[in-house]
Amino acid sequence: MRANSNNTEENKALTLMIFGATGDLTHRKLLPALYHLMAEKQLPDETRVIAIGRRDLSEEEYRASVRQSVARHSRSGVDETHLEEFINALSYHQMEFVSDPESYQGFKKRLEKIEKNYTQPAVRLFFLAVAPEFFGVIVSHLKANKLAVRRNPDHRVMIEKPFGSDLASARALNAIISDALDERQVYRIDHYLGKEMIRNILALRFGNSLFEPLWNHNYIDNIQITASETLGVEGRGAYYEQAGILKDMLQNHLLQMLALITMEPPADLMPESIRDEKVKALRALRRYETTGACAEIALGQYVSGLINGESVPGYREEKDVASDSVTPTFIALRANVDNFRWGGVPIYIRAGKRMNKRCTQIVVEFKRLPGINYYPEFKNQPPNLLVIEVQPTEGIHFQINAKRPGNGFVVDQVEMNYAQSSRFQGNVPEAYEQLILEAYRANSSLFTRWDELEQSWQFVESIERNCQPDSHHYPTYSPGSQGPERADLLLKADGRAWHEIELRTENIIKKGSSH
């Protein structure tokens, strides 16, 4: 999100090391991302990738698997020349990086041998694509073997979510990492922050005089943040029993979107200025501690049913899920940011699995004009809406009211759509491309700072501590629906309803069109 990249950083060589090189994340996301970054010359010529795994594979075996993964998961096809260049920059290193501390010495020798051939100083970027319980172990070993040296800004560690399983474990993990590294050396990943439309929020808010003067309780009626999925837990029952929708979506992705939408304008677009304002927004987020606060929350689990004529199991019937599980697969809530800008503006959040559609979007509903009811022609007109759609169609939808052509004075709804895919077909980087590139550039604004995480854990734990229904009367919803009925009642009690908006791409003029 920083306006300008750091040219000094981009003159340095790069050694990117992936712990967990044989895992699904590496093959589906990281390797294709690195291929595209190198093919498009986004990374320096002196870039080397060391894939670190515990499996006993030869260099040739691993490279063969990489060819297949990049070809299968590339966003725009594969150029054989570029693929060969990427493969030549890639090596595989087998080591027992969890239980054998001595293995780090052999790895260190190999790394130093590679770096001796660089003509420029090197950035060491360690990507931990491993199970969360290994984060602290690996960082401690990197410190002990002086592979990542504290206060050396060129030694950086990228850590996947989840960062802890609750506030206590997150604090414990942070203590281990803080003992080894400075905060500026730690890049905690929330891949949503690498998505183009999430990054676009700052440009939309602060780059348009149309919106920022209206971005407050005087002109905005409510904000709705939705993240729905059509899939169930898909064989990840054991993980989901520990996480649920609160830790899988709310604690990270959804609260990050809320922070970006509600934060104050930063002093500048440098990383720490942006993250300072995000922390303030999360700190102002009202916790669910008071009596009756849980009336603003709806939880639920999906049950078995039919989707497109196909039978799907309920959550409690999924593999590795307890038959009396109280883990929510859906949440809807009314959040309140208690500060001067947002006082009295409800922020409705909902997320769920096995819903009627796959969609992640933010809807900003503006207040109606105070005298609008005096004009009968304007009666029952819909409000002005600004919609930021993150997926599946990345774009912006702006809804206004205008006169319909004809002799009568009939006011109609007009939609202005911008679909990013229509204008930049095939040229939009994936989130992990953005994240890796910005970590190399030392741009931490796309990553989560510890105090942001701490505030978000406190918010989520206020829900877990006070608002859990019992297992015998757990609210449910049918697969392919919009969630439990209570989610609709939350808004109905406020005289509102969820917005169901689809960003339409037809009739959008594409870049290069003759019109």
Image (cartoon, rainbow, N blue to C red):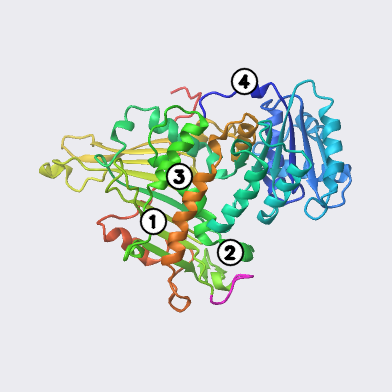
The residue indicated by pointer 3 is 257
Query: Could you give the CA–CA distance between mark 4 and mark 2, rounded to whole angstroms?
Result: 42 Å
The residue indicated by pointer 2 is 242
In front here: 94 or 513?
Answer: 94
The residue indicated by pointer 4 is 7
Q: Pick the quarter of the image with the C terminus.
A: top left
Q: Dot 4, crowdedness within 10 Å: few (<14), some or many (≥20)?
A: few
Amino acid type assigned to the residue bearing label 2 in the image = Gln
From which residue to which does the magenta span run?
A: 318-324
Q: Dot 2, crowdedness within 10 Å: few (<14), some or many (≥20)?
A: some
Extreme front residue here? 179
Question: Is 475 on the left-hand or right-hand side of 415?
Answer: right
The residue indicated by pointer 1 is 287
The residue located at (52%, 48%) in the rendering is 453
Which structural element holds mark 3? helix
Amino acid type assigned to the residue bearing label 4 in the image = Asn
